[in-house]
Structure formats: structure tokens, C-alpha cells
Image: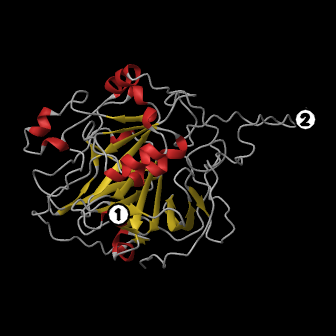
Amino acid sequence: MKKVLSLLLALTMAAGLLVSCGGKDEASSSEPAAAPASSSEPEEPPYNPNPLTGLENDGSYTEGERLTAIMINNIANNGANNARPQWGISNADILVEIKVEGGITRFMGLFSDYKSLPQVGPVRSARDQFFQLILPWEMLYVHIGESTVQSEYKTIWEYEDRDLNLDTTNFPRDQARLATGVKVEHAAYTNGEILSELVEERDYNMDRTYNSCFFDFVNYNEPNRVLNGDDAVKIDIVHSTNYRTYFDYDASTNRYMMSQYSAYTGSINPTVDANNDEQLGFENVIVLFTDIHRHPNYVNDSYDIQQVEYGDGGVGYYFNGGKAEYIRWMKGSPNQALRIVDSEGNEQSVKINPGKTYLGIVSTGDDTAGQFGYYPSESASSTSVPEADSTATDYVDTDQ
């Protein structure tokens, strides 16, 4: 049976600056662990997680270094406006998808180590709905251009020394991609070498110690938590008519494999990384619902700037291990961290199992939330595929 989102809860909640990780609350996360009560008690195994995945740090994250967020194009309207397949998205520890303009969605990849990145892109412009998610973490924010609203946010929060806004002098265009006929704005990319040179050139301070993780992860020394909910082997997420994301659970790898609808091809295709032709898979899928609408300061603006309402929180679903769990989420002001909490109203953090995460934020202001669904088996799904719209065009960023 299809599970459909309930009406958005009216919530007024305050969130802490950062969430805890691996079973420690924020008040104690920066303090050394207490010594065992007696010599007969076994010592706890060491706990050194990657702050984006909760997995044991294998060297992919350099401790004491700032995390990195990169804006990545996801347009797939027609031959000239097509950014797929993207480069480097399989390297993201967390992949965020939110609607921007004209129903188009955009990705933001969160990466543990910018220095070792392969080709990543197509890099696209910044939006405040993504920026607000990384602001509390003070990540290096990589993009090409930005909306007028994001420019205001960057100034208000004095983020200039962590904002890497690329321009025509410091990023290349993929010539093979251009040869296919796509517009030039869908072929820009970056990589670890380029970012390292720019960080050094601009003298950005990349020192940053994280005492918490992006989510409240289960300690990797402990067994994964079994979700308290229905079976969910297929997930259908509708961001807009032409931007739909699907996940199919692979029990052999314990991952949800990602696919997307393309208006350009008129079909659902696996989401692959152009660097390795491998389909993306995530241990965790988190879908959050809130009101997304045209920004009130730009109601007459042809750029259709979207505003995501974070202040009051909302409801959503957490998927892991072929199971679904109904959740709530909290954020508050832009400089407060996103928190995933239980549905009982007591603001208890939901433990997220370690691994890579897809985070999708979906609008309740139109019919897209009502089209969301998850299913106990492939055969139970009633996936709808809209007709291809070859007339759809990209929205031009105000700064380009």
C-alpha cells in the first residue's frame, strides 16, 4: 500500500547548533570520556567517525579540516539543457536535492576531503536553501555564481572567507560534453587540484574541528539499528512534474540504488557517475517535507527564485535496510543545524545508521508531496512517468 505524507505539522521548535554523533549528546561531545569505574570494566573501543557518514574514519577525512560543499547541476530538459550524467557525485558522502527554479532541482554534494576530489560537476550557482544547511558547519562552499538572495545571505552571515565562487578564470569546461551540443553553463567542472590551488591562492583558513556529526549516527562499533516501520523496497519522490527521483533497495549491498526521470529522454534512467559509470547507492535515504514557494521579495521576477521554509520544521521519512520510519525534523534559524527527531513530539534525536545519505527536501505547497510514496515490493509500485517536455528551458542565473 502506498504511504502518502500527512499534512505538514505546525511546529515551533528550537534546534541546537550542532547535532550529536555516535551516542553522545552535544554537551558532552567535546569532553574526554570518563575513566572506567574500575579496572575490571572493559574499556570502550575507540570512536573516530567521519562527520558526514558516521563510519570509522579510514583517512578519507582529514581531522581538523573544513568539510566541503559543491553545487552540482541536475538539469535534464532537452539536448541543449542537460547536465547528466554528472561527474564526481558518487564521491559525495551526502547528496542533497532541492527544487530551485522552474521546477528544476539541483544537487549539493558534501565531501570529506576537497584535495583528493576527481572531476566534479557540472558546477552550478549557489542558492540559500542549500547554504542554510551548511552554514552551521562552516563548510567551504564551492559554486559558480549565486542568486541575489544567496548574495544577501552570504553578506549577512559574513561567509566570504569560506565561499569559493568560481569565475571564468579558474574553472575549465569539459570539451567532450560541449561537443554533444549542451550549453556552456552545463559543462563547467572542478577537481581537487583546482580547489587546492584556489584555497592557497585566496589564503582561506581550512582549519575546523568538528565535535559532532551531520546526523546523530549509531556508533559504528555497535550493530545497525533496525527501523521501526513498514517495509520499503521502492521509494518515489516527486519534486516537480519533470524532476522525480526513485530508489530501489538492494538487499545484497544494503543500499538504495538511485534513478531519475529525464524529460530529455522521456524515461527513468539510473543515476550514474560519469567518472566511473556506476549507479549511485545510499545506505540512508531521508525525505523531508516543507513549504517551498516563490520568494516573496521576487514575486514579479522572471527568475522564479524559490524560498524553502526551514524555521518551523516539519515531517518526513527515514529509509534504511529496506524499512521506513516516520520522523520529524527541526532547524530554526539559518545558523542552527538540521536535526532529525522522532515523531512522538519529545524532540528525541533519531539515530541514523552509518553510511552515505541522500537528503531530499520536497514541497508541501503543491501536489508533489501527495505524489510521494514508498512500497513493500517492486510489484506494488505504481510509478508514474510524465510525458517528455522537450520545450522546457533552463533558468538563467541573475549574476551571469
Q: Residue at x 10, y 50 (%)?
A: 80
Tell me if 89 is positioned left or right of 84 in this view. right
Q: Position of residue 399 (x, y in %)?
A: 24, 45
280, 143: nearer the viewer: 143
Quarter of the image with the C terminus is top left
Q: Alpha-carbon neighbours of circle 2 within 10 Å: few (<14), some, or many (≥20)?
A: few
| Residue sitting farthest toward the right | 38
For numbered disc 2, what is the local secondary structure? Answer: loop
Q: Residue at x 66, y 71 (%)?
A: 345
- Amino acid type shown at disc 1: Asn
Q: CA distance from mark 2 to mark 1?
A: 65 Å
| Rendered location of residue 384, percent (x, y) | 26, 73
Number of other residues with Cα within 10 Å of mark 1, as a class: few under 14, some 14 to 19, many 20 or more: few
| Residue at numbered disc 2 | 40
Q: Does 75 appear above or below 116?
A: below
**Coordinates of residue 344 in the picture (x, y in percent):** 65, 72
